[in-house]
Amino acid sequence: MELFEDAVAVLAAEYPGDERGRMLRSLGVKTGGKFYAFATEVDVVVKLSAGRVAELVAAGVGVPCETRPGHPMREWVRLVPADVDECLDHLREARAFVAESAAS
C-alpha cells in the first residue's frame, strides 16, 4: 500500500531506530523489536490498547483484525486512512502505545 509506504518514510526520519519487517506476510514496522503496524493491500493495521480498538470499531472507523474468522486480535485494528496525514496519526498513536508498553 503506497499510502503506508509514504507514511513509514516520514516516520523513518522521526524515528531512525525503527525497523521494517514482515508481519502476517505483509510489510510492517516495529520499534524496540515489537511491531506496531503493518499494511495489507487495502488497509493499515495498527496495534492499540483494546479499549482504543473498541472505540474505533464502535465509531465505524475501524474493523477488528482477525487472523482467523471469529478470532479477533484484541489489540489490533484495521483502518483505511484517507491520506498520508491520517495514516501518520494512526501510526504515531500505535508507535506510542507499543513504545510505552515496552517501557513498562
Image: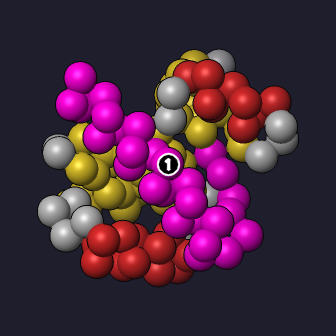
Q: Amino acid at mark 1?
A: Glu
Query: Is residue 3 found left or right of 33 in the rendered image?
Result: right
- Residue 59 location (% of width, % of height): 83, 37
**The C terminus sits in image quarter:** top left
Residue 3 falls in image quadrant: bottom right
Front in this rendered view, residue 48 or 39? 48
28 on left or right of 77: left
* Magenta region: 78-104
Chief secondary structure of the magenta portion: helix
Taking the magenta stretch, the answer to whether it contains residue 90 is: yes
Q: In the image, is residue 88 above or below residue 101? A: below
Question: Which residue is located at x 62 percent, y 45 percent?
Answer: 78
Q: Position of residue 84 (x, y in %)?
A: 59, 75
Is 55 a magenta residue?
no
| 81 w.r.t. 84: above or below | above
Q: Residue at x 24, y 50 (%)?
A: 31
Residue 63 appears in the figure = yes
Count up the numbered dots. Answer: 1
- Determine whether 67 is above or below 33 in the image: above
Residue tagged by mark 1?
Answer: 93
Q: Quadrant of residue 21?
A: bottom left
**SS assignment at label 1:** helix
Residue 57 image position (x, y, % from top left): 75, 34
Query: Within 10 Å of the Cα at label 1, are there few (<14), some (14-19), or many (20+) other Cα atoms?
Result: some
